[in-house]
Amino acid sequence: MIQFLFIPAFFGLSTEVYIIYFLIGLTTFFLWRHLFRRYIRNEGIRKIATWAATLFGIPFIYAGLIAALLFGITYEHSLDFNQLKWMKDREKRYQMANDLIESKILIGKDTSQVKQILGIANSVNTDGEWVYTMGMGGGGLGFMFHNLIIKFDNHKVLAVEHAKIPD
């Protein structure tokens, strides 16, 4: 196999991590230096404080940026349940699943009431569970197929689940 880009690693971290560390350090150094000029009059203490704040702050800022990136990638937009949107846009139904489950709109309803609210199920499992397909999306770097599973007991809704199937 041909490797197009070789990125060496030093002390277990690849080169781009050090580049990101350098850029974070450069910007925070000037930020701390500007801030400490206002509050610390002694130049020696100000230099030590600037370097210490920069060196100790870099890993925390880097971890925060990674956490924000992961949150942004895995964030799923959530909407309140709206029957018209549910019927009209089948590919975005998964955005209403959390509201449907948390509000317990369906709990205790019989099969005809569920059909009236959600329409006809896409399939029925061997256990008598109704499955509604809710589209795909919201899987971070990949995709997730979303299903709403409704469990019945004596023809009344006992539980509602949001099943996510990774692609």
Image (tube, rainbow, N blue to C red):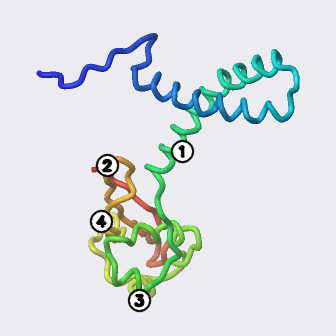
Q: Quadrant of residue 27?
A: top right
Q: Earlier in the sequence, mark 1 or mark 2?
A: 1
Where residue 97 appears, as percent x and y from the top left, is 46, 68
Residue shown at 57% from the left, 33% from the top? 63
Residue identifier under label 4: 125
Where residue 34 appears, as percent x and y from the top left, is 73, 34
Tell me how far mark 4 sits from mark 1, CA to CA: 39 Å
Which sits in the foreground, 2 or 160? 2
Tell me how far mark 3 sits from mark 2, CA to CA: 33 Å
Q: Residues within 10 Å of mark 3 (few under 14, many from 20)?
A: few
Tell me how far mark 3 sits from mark 1, CA to CA: 41 Å
Residue identifier under label 1: 68
Residue shown at 12% from the left, 22% from the top? 2
Camera-near label (3 vs 1) is 1
Q: Earlier in the sequence, mark 3 or mark 4?
A: 3
Q: Residues within 10 Å of mark 2 (few under 14, many from 20)?
A: few
Where residue 71 appears, as percent x and y from the top left, is 51, 48
Residue shown at 59% from the left, 38% from the top? 64
Q: Quadrant of residue 162?
A: bottom left
Circle 1 SS class: helix
Q: Earlier in the sequence, mark 4 or mark 2?
A: 4
Q: Earlier in the sequence, mark 3 or mark 1?
A: 1
Where residue 56 appears, as percent x and y from the top left, is 68, 22
Residue identifier under label 2: 142
Circle 2 SS class: loop
Report the disc number at residue 116. 3
Q: Earlier in the sequence, mark 4 or mark 1?
A: 1
Q: Looking at the picture, which amino acid does disc 3 mark?
A: Gln
Tell me how far mark 1 sits from mark 2, CA to CA: 18 Å
Q: Residues within 10 Å of mark 4 (few under 14, many from 20)?
A: few
